[in-house]
């Protein structure tokens, strides 16, 4: 791990946590063992992200397509999510972390929905880090529901304000573990100008050193947002008041 500090830290990091099942299979363990280990990786990432100055962290916990997995695995994932939320929420609150759940939550069990509401209410005023968990989420669903809500409100052209966590900045850095090179229906609108970082590391093995590598990679990127390199560098060189 590099000892050099990261100069440009992303405000918002989004993560597809891939490789739990393969991590377990490589060790001749049931797939659920990988999911349990993956929870520890989430804890590590939250701690390090907060220490590095990341303001928003979004993880893809369960996609709208994951219902197609074996019923036993789906049931376990839901049980694990409920247990982790129940056991960890007070720790998040004590550390000033705000919890948000994004997705079609109506499809979840009443117990999980109640636990989510309680967690969001408890941590609503925390500002150290906003931790978004995407559960039963899909990017296509997100855009569809945003358009429907905007039309119902009479503001169809303003549908982006109805997207999930529209009150937060779009992700600056997207991380996908596990070796796959795709977005998988995650934050399709929000990732338009996000830097995409892919690693072969399986999610349970994603540690502080790997996160630091992703941050240094991000800091090396020139983010132009449709401008020329010269324009982008001139804009970044402006004092903060001038940019506002």
Image: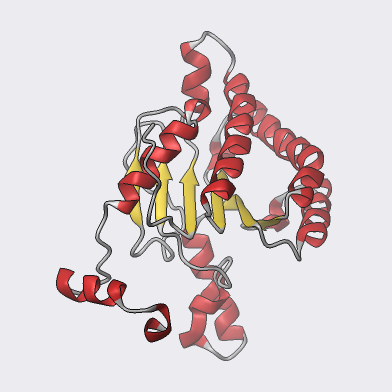
- Is 57 or 5 nearer to us in this picture? 5
Q: Which residue is at a point 68% across and 62% down the rendered structure image?
A: 127
Furthest residue toward top: 28
111 left or right, relative to 5:
right
Q: Quadrant of residue 198?
A: top left
Location of the C terminus (image quadrant) = bottom left
Q: Which residue is at a point 79% across and 49% down the rendered structure image?
A: 94
Q: Is residue 104 above or below residue 159?
A: above
- Is 176 or 55 nearer to us in this picture? 55
Q: Which residue is at a point 51% across and 55% down the rendered structure image?
A: 138
Furthest residue toward bottom: 154
x and y percentages locating residue 85 in the rendered image: 75, 43
Residue 144 can be seen, yes or no: yes
Q: Is residue 128 above or below residue 178?
A: below
Residue 64 can be seen, yes or no: no
x and y percentages locating residue 137 in the rendered image: 57, 53
């Amino acid at each position: 791990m590099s000892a050099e500090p990261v100069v440009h830290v992303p405000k918002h990091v989004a993560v597809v946590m891939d490789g739990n099942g393969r991590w377990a299979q490589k060790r001749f363990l049931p797939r659920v063992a990988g999911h349990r280990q993956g929870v520890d990786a989430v804890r590590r990432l939250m701690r390090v992200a907060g220490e590095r100055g990341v303001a928003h962290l979004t993880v893809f916990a369960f996609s709208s397509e994951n219902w197609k997995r074996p019923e036993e695995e789906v049931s376990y994932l839901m049980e694990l999510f409920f247990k982790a939320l129940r056991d960890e929420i007070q720790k998040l609150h004590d550390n000033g972390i705000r919890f948000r759940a994004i997705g079609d939550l109506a499809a979840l069990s009443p117990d999980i929905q109640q636990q989510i509401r309680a967690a969001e209410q408890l941590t609503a005023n925390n500002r150290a880090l906003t931790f978004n968990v995407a559960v039963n989420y899909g990017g296509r669903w997100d855009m569809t529901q945003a358009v429907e809500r905007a039309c119902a409100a009479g503001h169809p052209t303003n549908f982006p304000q109805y997207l999930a966590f529209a009150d937060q900045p779009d992700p600056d850095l997207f991380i996908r573990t596990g070796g796959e090179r795709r977005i998988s229906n995650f934050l399709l609108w929000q990732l338009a100008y996000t830097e995409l970082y892919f690693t072969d590391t399986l999610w349970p093995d994603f540690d502080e050193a790997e996160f630091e590598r992703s941050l240094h990679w991000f800091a090396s990127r020139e983010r132009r947002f449709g401008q020329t390199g010269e324009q982008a560098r001139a804009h970044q060189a402006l004092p903060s008041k001038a940019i506002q």
